[in-house]
Image (tube, helix red, strand yellow):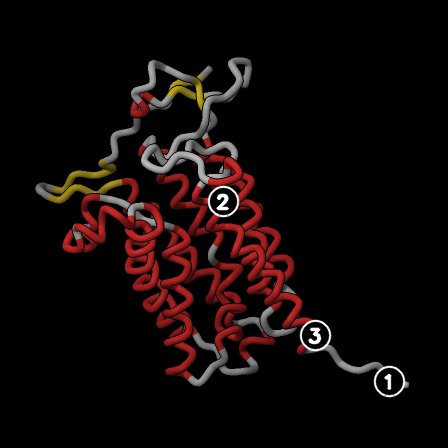
């Protein structure tokens, strides 16, 4: 059985300015996005329709706004709606913590729609370009969760070699699954490999986005079986967590998008 190393959350102290590891993981996420999206923009199928590095930079700007605004609103109204409806001013208190991936995803989708409308590009043209570049950012942020010793997993079998005690849990030293690392490996690394390989060849518009939605939703759904539910919510209907209930619509939406894209781009057979 392992014990969480209790990393100092401050990576670097520059006078009164404290640089936190969690902030660094977000910078790594954005840096990886710029590098990977820049590579995709240079692929023949994207360069042929005018994608440039400046477009990638602008997409990141819209995406960052979507992540921050959508992630915060999603946490407030998906996870603690009763509290924040009565304390609306605290919705803007981001320094108190609380972000939701599913809310951030909705924010990013809205940002992509705004970008596409401004540049006269179809929504799925934009989302297909960036979808394979997102999982590495998810991986970086999940590693940040692990460094912070937060969002730990459920109780693990005593003989699990990598079971870990998280002192922050104040649970008397229960060995738990390091679910942050599971999510980094699944929703991050594995999903990146799947999408990057799938997107190397030209695909019907919308198919890559559909695979992302299905892939993330399914991997997050499975990971939630190992992640400790939020203590203020617990398990919901069918003994599923809130994260699982929010992932289910993603899976269904991904299937619908993929089927729609495949049928829409199908060519009739030549007799």
At mark 2, the secondary structure is: helix
- The residue positioned 33% from the left and 30% from the top of the image is 149
Q: CA distance from mark 3 to mark 1?
A: 17 Å
Few, some or many C-alpha atoms within 10 Å of disc 3 (few <14, some 14-19, many ≥20)? few
Would you name the residue on which mark 1 appears? 270
Q: CA distance from mark 1 to mark 2?
A: 44 Å
At mark 1, the secondary structure is: loop
At mark 3, the secondary structure is: helix
- Which of the two discs, 2 and 3, labels the residue nearer the N terminus? 2
Image coordinates of residue 55 in percent, x first then y, are 40, 75
Answer left or right for 9 relative to 254: left
Q: Which mark is residue 244?
A: 2
Few, some or many C-alpha atoms within 10 Å of disc 1 (few <14, some 14-19, many ≥20)? few
Image coordinates of residue 29 in percent, x first then y, are 39, 52
Q: Which mark is residue 263?
A: 3
Is 31 rendered above or below residue 165?
below
- The residue positioned 16% from the left and 38% from the top of the image is 13
- Which of the two discs, 1 and 2, labels the residue nearer the N terminus? 2
- The residue positioned 50% from the left and 71% from the top of the image is 41
Q: CA distance from mark 2 to mark 3?
A: 29 Å
- Which of the two discs, 3 and 1, labels the residue nearer the N terminus? 3
Q: Which residue is nearer to you in this view: 87 or 42?
A: 87
Is 38 rendered above or below residue 215?
below
Disc 2 + disc 3, Cβ < 8 Å:
no
Disc 1 + disc 2, Cβ < 8 Å:
no
Q: Quadrant of residue 267?
A: bottom right
């Amino acid at each position: 059985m392992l014990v969480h190393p209790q990393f100092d959350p401050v990576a670097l102290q520059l006078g009164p300015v404290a640089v936190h590891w969690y902030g660094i993981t977000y910078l790594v996420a954005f840096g990886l996005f710029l590098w990977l999206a820049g590579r995709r923009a240079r692929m023949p199928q994207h360069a042929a329709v005018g994608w440039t590095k400046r477009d990638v930079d602008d997409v990141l700007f819209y995406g960052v706004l979507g992540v921050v605004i959508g992630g915060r609103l999603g946490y407030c109204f998906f996870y603690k709606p009763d509290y924040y409806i009565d304390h609306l001013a605290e919705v803007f208190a981001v320094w108190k913590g609380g972000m939701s991936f599913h809310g951030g995803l909705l924010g990013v989708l809205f940002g992509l729609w705004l970008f596409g409308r401004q540049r006269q590009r179809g929504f799925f043209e934009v989302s297909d370009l960036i979808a394979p570049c997102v999982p590495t950012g998810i991986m970086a942020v999940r590693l940040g969760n692990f460094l912070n010793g937060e969002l730990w997993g459920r109780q693990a079998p005593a003989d699990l070699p990598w079971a870990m005690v998280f002192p922050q849990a104040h649970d008397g030293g229960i060995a738990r699954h390091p679910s942050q690392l599971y999510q980094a490996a699944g929703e991050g690394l594995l999903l990146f490999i799947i999408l990057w390989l799938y997107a190397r060849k030209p695909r019907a518009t919308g198919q890559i986005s559909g695979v992302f939605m299905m892939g993330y939703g399914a991997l997050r759904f499975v990971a939630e079986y190992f992640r400790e539910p939020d203590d203020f919510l617990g398990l919901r209907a069918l003994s599923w967590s809130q994260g699982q209930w929010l992932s289910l619509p993603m899976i269904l939406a991904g299937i619908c998008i993929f089927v729609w894209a495949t049928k829409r781009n199908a060519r009739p057979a030549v007799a």
